[in-house]
Image (cartoon, rainbow, N blue to C red):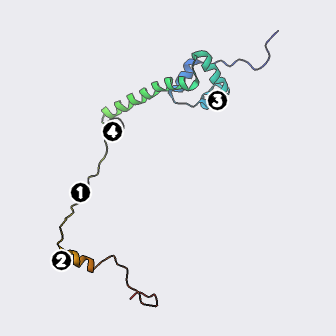
């Protein structure tokens, strides 16, 4: 007796790995093959004996290497923006803005301290009985 149900979905595994390298999501890969994400997860488990997430991490890493290689090529050809970006993200370089402030500290004697306390610049204005500042 023939099997009933949906036709078997065939996955082109080379194509699957290329989609992972391009950092396509599970839903995007499922859409590409015309099936559900559950089908992709099941087929990946059957093929690799690992979860989709684990396989995706492995396969997408080669895509990162390709991007990094291209960035280095661009930088070495003189692309200043790429040189700066790689320096900041790989070498932890930063565009530091240096700001210098000079503060003069002077020690006050007893007389100067009395003068400062007598002329408290932060004191609230005194009010008369009506509540109006005087």
**Kind of element beneath mark 1:** loop
Instruction: Name the residue beneath numbered marker 3.
Output: 31
Is residue 49 depicted above or below 113 in this figure? above
In the rendered structure, which disc, 4 or 1, sits on the residue that comes first in sequence? 4
Picture layout, residue 49 above or below residue 79: above
Whether residue 88 sits left or right of residue 30 in the image: it is left
Q: Residues within 10 Å of mark 4 (few under 14, many from 20)?
A: few
Lateral position of residue 61 relative to residue 76, left or right: right
Distance in Å between CA atoms under marks 1 and 2: 32 Å
Task: Judge by depth and name the residue closer to the eye, 112 or 121.
Answer: 112
Q: Is residue 125 left or right of residue 41?
A: left
Q: Quadrant of the C terminus?
A: bottom left
Pick the quarter of the image with the N terminus.
Answer: top right
Q: CA distance from mark 1 to mark 3?
A: 57 Å
Q: Residue at x 68, y 19 (%)?
A: 9
Label 3, residues with CA under 10 Å away: few <14, some 14-19, many ≥20: few
Q: Which residue is mark 4?
A: 92
N-terminal of the two: label 2 or label 3? 3
């Amino acid at each position: 007796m023939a099997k009933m149900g949906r036709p078997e979905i065939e996955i082109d595994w080379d194509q699957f790995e290329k989609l992972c390298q391009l950092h396509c999501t599970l839903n995007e890969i499922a859409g590409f093959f015309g099936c559900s994400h559950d089908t992709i997860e099941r087929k990946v488990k059957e093929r690799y004996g690992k979860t989709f997430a684990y396989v995706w991490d492995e396969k997408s890493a080669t895509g990162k290497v390709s991007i990094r290689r291209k960035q280095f090529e661009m930088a070495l050809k003189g692309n200043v923006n790429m040189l700066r970006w790689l320096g900041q993200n790989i070498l932890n370089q930063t565009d530091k803005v240096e700001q210098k402030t000079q503060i003069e500290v002077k020690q006050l004697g007893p007389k100067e301290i009395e003068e400062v306390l007598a002329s408290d610049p932060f004191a609230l204005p005194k009010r008369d009985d009506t509540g109006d500042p005087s």
